[in-house]
Amino acid sequence: MARNKPFVEPISLAEPSPLDLKQSRDLEQHLRDQGLYESQEEAELREVVLGRLDALVKDWIRGVAELRGHPAEDANAKIFTFGSYRLGVHGPGADIDTLCVGPSYATREEDFFGTEPHCLQAILSQLPEVEALRAVTGAYVPVMEMKFCGISIDLLYARLAVPLVREDLDIGATHTLRHCDDQSVRSLNGCRVTDMILREVPSVEHFRTTLRCLKLWAERRGVYSNVTGYLGGVNWAILVAYICKLYPRGAPSLLVSRFFKVYAQWGWPTPIMLRPIERDASLAMPVWDPRENPRDRTHLMPIITPAYPCMNSSYNVSECTLAVMAEEFRRGDEVCGQILSRTGPGPTDWGKLLEPLPFFEGFKHFLQVEVVAGSKEDFEMWEGWVHSRMRLLIKSAGMMVDVRPWPKAFRPPDQQQQQHDGTGEQKPVQPRCLYFMGLSKKKPQVYNQYSQALVIPQSKVDLTAPVNEFAHKVKEWDQRREGMDIAVRHLLQRHLPDWVRPQRGEAPPADTAGAAAAPDAGGAAAAPAAAAQAQLIGAKRPSEGGEGAEAAAAAKRQQTGALSAAPAAGAESRVSAAAAANGTAGPPSRGNSDVQVAELQRQQEAPLATAAGAAETASELRAASQEASLAAVGDIGDWTVLQSEAQPGDDSAAVQAALPAAQQKKQPIAVMLSSA
């Protein structure tokens, strides 16, 4: 009887060569040198903490059972782990994602969260070993955050539709989801997806080494963040697991190399799936299927979770962030080819692949989003909300220019010091952080595969509308308080703060991907060497998975709607005008479109003039520089009142005098993009 073909057919079944094994040992040693592995003492402490937490929830559920009239001797609750800890790729100081599974009579609102004596939140708050306990009840997946004996814990709750939770409960079984509420289903799926990934990979050990490497690479190259529009931990795990299935006997060095080679050539939006999409008629939960769900067709980089109900885990990816990741995949493929082709006796140079991205050296223009709040508590909530909305600005601005957002925030070093007023008394520092997006000119390209029209980038773009829309949507938050504010500014590279750029030859501070904790704004002063560097805020947020397909579909409809009206009347008319000037007529044909694209590229690379013409005199040069560095100031609620921002060393009066009279008071955000 013929065997069934596997869903993912292997490309190669070859055993690793001695060179592969040597390069893999070098890779693991390099990862250890980077501090990605925790000590034995910390690993044992984690086991103790999890055992203590499991005993606590069992005591808690017995109290709830007595209160609800159920026999206490039969009551049971159980702790499961998921995320990087369950996958075995966590590093020192990383948090542990945990799930408490309870019976039907223990509710999330009245028994898990709450200040009543029988509530688990109240019980944990009374323990001396529990610190920084915080309940995030309004998140897409409600979570309780805490430090338990110094170990960061994120605790979710899933309420099963049965009165008894067995100790041998298999949460991987589909029937476990029956009659569960949506929040419980989402909480359970964290564990179900993690367990399914581990079951699908041929070698767990090779999978873990490869995933550790790729997570470190993604963080250092600035593409590790689901909420920003890149990929998060589960996305990278699924991508690595797929490569492991293509090369089931491959050593980690080969898997890393093939990871970049495969995804550098992948034809998105072809989905990544580890197994067939499972359906259950009795549960009838919606699953990802673009044949049935029109909004699923708008997803640009579908990475499908392997557990029922199968969903796209990367719906936040936009055209800009997809282009960034595609470019990084190509760069990784090229670098891997270089370092693995060297067969000498020395160690493999994996550090070249894992070099941090010199983000601030790669762009001349930036958008800076400043987030401020009146207190530390308000800042934590406000910064999380603004960060979750940032993808709206990325998508809308990405229709005009190429945008590369840096996923983590920078905290100014002056927050590590007390501020003084005029009387010499200390006053509290207002918490704030900065997000940056690199801007570059769009390249001429064919609009789509069905049209001959060209998308011709503009030399000067006005980002007022995207900024205005983003600001108003952010400010509409119903939990916004006094003091919570944002400011968006356009900066040239030379006007960036010195502290955001690491010293030459010095890598930016990096934590284990997804595991960095937000710095304490009121903490002690940092060491002198660290004070000169920006502090990265990259804490994983429980709300990263929120507002999935609806937001993606709406953004895509807006994107396609804005672009589809332009090709014939906009780009094609400009091409026709250019063709008429050159003695030709009509839109480019298939035979000469590449030549015209190259010519347009050459024209775009020519030096750009300001709106008033070529800059010739010194005053006009300074005026042009000022025009290219306009900034939004004043109240965020009125984005039409935008004034030019004087830079350090500029003579504001002279600059204003050089500008036209109509521009001396108010300016729109006009980003003048040079070709370099």
Image (cartoon, rainbow, N blue to C red):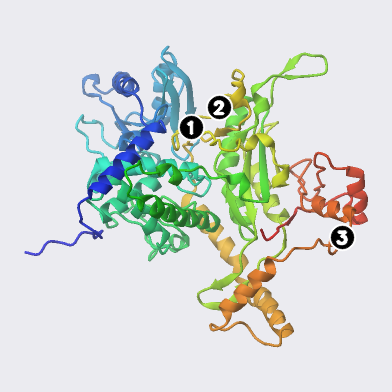
Res. 516 mark: 1
Name the kind of residue labelled 3 in the image: Glu
Disc 1 to disc 3, how far (Cα)? 50 Å
Q: Residue at x 57, y 82 (%)?
A: 592
Q: Secondary structure at mark 3?
A: loop
Q: What quarter of the picture does the C terminus occupy?
A: bottom right
Q: Position of residue 645 (x, y in %)?
A: 80, 44
Res. 519 mark: 2
User: Which quadrant holds residue 47?
Assistant: top left
Q: Secondary structure at mark 1?
A: loop
Q: Nearer the viewer, mark 2 or mark 3?
A: 3
Q: Position of residue 610 (x, y in %)?
A: 81, 61
Q: Viewed as shown, does residue 198 lie left or right of 570? A: left
Q: Position of residue 284 (x, y in %)?
A: 31, 54
- The answer to whether one can see residue 36 in this image is no
* Nearer-the-camera pick, 302 or 511: 511
The outermost residue toward the left is 1
Q: Are marks 2 and 1 in contact (CB under 8 Å)?
A: no
